Image (cartoon, rainbow, N blue to C red):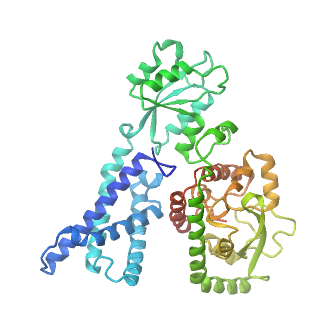
């Protein structure tokens, strides 16, 4: 994987994305030449209209990222990729129209844009037919040797068998005799020189997957492997990189303390985040005020009670604040206290089910962003009762409050909606990843991917 601004991106996704960007530029240039020939205009050098091509390619590429064209499913299924690609093109046309309205002459001519879009879609689909198939083969996956043959090694085996996995395990080495969950594991005593063994397998990485490290850490072996130029990784770090979450089952306090992350020197990033929140929340409130007003009236007409719902939530450093949302449940929904939402929850009103699916009920929270109590991106704020319960049942739950809560977040775009203790545990793993690896780049990626969740609201309640 490639680490970009502290966030890991699979090599296959990066390669496919860069090829797509190049093909979009070529499709734009081909469309320009074709249209010039139709109107009998002398062709001009590509540099003279390079800016128009770059705007076109970047807008389409950004829309592709936003709707999930580079997700695991899209890399496996041509039908899935084609559907997302058509949605991305539709959104791109709208976005380019807005750009042309605000900055006249900043995009391709309409006829040229049509040719570029058609040519781009064909080129991108062909790219997936050719490159997509190759990227799924083991030749394009990192070769990994696992030191250990217990439950942790078995978890890595299951992870490596997934079709979207970016690595293939070429050997398991059992360091403790008789302790193995994998029959194919090779006993350590059968290998004379581990460094040479790893080198012969052309492995690019060795992962330490021991159940108990005290008095069993093979320091000499690890040193020999390291001096062979092979990357050595620890189990929790490997899982974090491959899954985009912090694994609560295996992570230790020492790993959180000594691993990269939770940087204190993020002052510039925090200032940039706040400036963005102020500007975007003010603009969004201005634009969506008519929508909020309309649906506030509809909520009043749909069911008895106030249009808005106010509730205390826990925010940065455990401080409480009041969050404001459009009411989507009956007024007596919490007469017996706060409780998790359920699938087909009877407390949700008819209109409430719709506004939850399209996230319109979240719009008034923009006021909390403007006030500085929330951010656009961050862990979802929970009610005090749930926080108290979850802190007692889960390790490191309080650490999610080291960053401002958000309207959308890493957990929201990676984990289907869930409302239970087990769901909260899974979401905490993603929240810890975000708190540990936060950068403006990750924020922008989450904001873009939120569009995918809105368009395909799987599991929304």
Up-down: is 69 above or below 422? below
Q: Quick one: quadrant of the C terminus?
A: bottom right
Q: Residue 330's spot in the image, x, y percent? A: 78, 75
Relative side of 353 to 452, left or right: right
Q: Residue 220's spot in the image, x, y percent? A: 53, 18
Residue 83 visible at all: no
Residue drawn 81% across the image and 60% down it: 384
Up-down: is 291 above or below 413? below
Give the tally of numbered discs.
0
* The quadrant where residue 286 appears: bottom right
Q: Quick one: quadrant of the N terminus?
A: top left
Residue drawn 58% across the image and 78% down it: 284
* The quadrant where residue 395 appears: top right
Relative side of 195 to 410, left or right: left
Relative side of 339 to 426, left or right: right
Relative side of 296 to 195, left or right: right
Residue 428 visible at all: yes
Q: Residue 295's spot in the image, x, y percent? A: 65, 83
In the image, 49 versus 459, the foreground residue is 49
Q: Residue 246's spot in the image, x, y percent? A: 62, 45
In the image, 205 versus 347, the foreground residue is 205
* The quadrant where residue 248 appears: top right
């Amino acid at each position: 994987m490639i680490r970009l601004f502290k966030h890991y991106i699979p090599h296959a996704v990066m390669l496919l994305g860069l090829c797509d960007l190049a093909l979009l530029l070529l499709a734009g240039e081909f469309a320009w030449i074709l249209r010039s020939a139709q109107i009998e205009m002398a062709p001009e050098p590509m540099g003279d209209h390079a800016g128009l091509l770059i705007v076109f390619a970047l807008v389409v590429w950004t829309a592709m990222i936003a709707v999930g064209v580079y997700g695991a499913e899209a890399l496996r299924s041509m039908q899935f990729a084609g559907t997302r690609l058509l949605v991305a093109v539709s959104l791109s046309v709208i976005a380019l129209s807005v750009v042309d309205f605000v900055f006249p002459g900043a995009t391709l001519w309409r006829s040229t844009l049509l040719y570029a879009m058609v040519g781009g879609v064909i080129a991108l689909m062909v790219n997936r037919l050719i490159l997509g198939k190759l990227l799924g083969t083991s030749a394009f996956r990192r070769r990994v040797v696992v030191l250990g043959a217990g439950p942790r090694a078995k978890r890595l085996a299951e992870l490596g068998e997934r079709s979207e996995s970016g690595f293939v395990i070429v050997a398991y080495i059992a360091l403790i005799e008789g302790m193995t969950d994998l029959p194919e594991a090779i006993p350590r005593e059968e290998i004379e020189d581990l460094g040479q063994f790893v080198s012969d397998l052309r492995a690019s990485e060795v992962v330490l997957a021991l159940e108990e490290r005290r008095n069993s850490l093979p320091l000499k072996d690890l040193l020999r492997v390291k001096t062979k130029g092979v990357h050595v990784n620890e189990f929790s770090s490997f899982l974090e990189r491959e899954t985009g979450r912090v694994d609560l089952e295996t992570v230790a306090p020492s790993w959180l303390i000594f691993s990269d992350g939770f940087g204190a020197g993020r002052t510039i990033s925090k200032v940039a985040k706040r400036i963005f929140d102020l500007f975007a929340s003010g603009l969004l409130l201005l634009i969506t005020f008519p929508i909020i007003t309309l649906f506030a009236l509809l909520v009043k007409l749909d069911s008895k009670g106030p249009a808005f719902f106010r509730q205390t939530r826990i925010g940065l450093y455990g401080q409480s604040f009041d969050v404001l949302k459009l009411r989507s449940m009956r007024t007596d929904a919490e007469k017996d206290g706060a409780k998790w939402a359920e699938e087909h929850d009877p407390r949700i009103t008819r209109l409430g089910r719709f506004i939850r699916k399209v996230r319109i009920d979240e719009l008034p929270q923009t006021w909390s962003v403007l006030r500085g109590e929330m951010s656009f991106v961050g862990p979802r704020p929970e009610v005090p009762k749930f926080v108290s319960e979850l802190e007692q049942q889960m390790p490191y739950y309080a650490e999610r409050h080291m960053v401002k809560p958000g309207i959308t977040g890493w957990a929201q775009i990676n984990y289907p909606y869930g409302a239970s203790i087990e769901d909260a545990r899974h979401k905490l793993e993603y929240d810890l990843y975000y708190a540990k690896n936060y950068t403006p780049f990750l924020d922008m990626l989450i904001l873009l991917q939120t569009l995918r969740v809105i368009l395909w609201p799987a599991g929304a309640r």
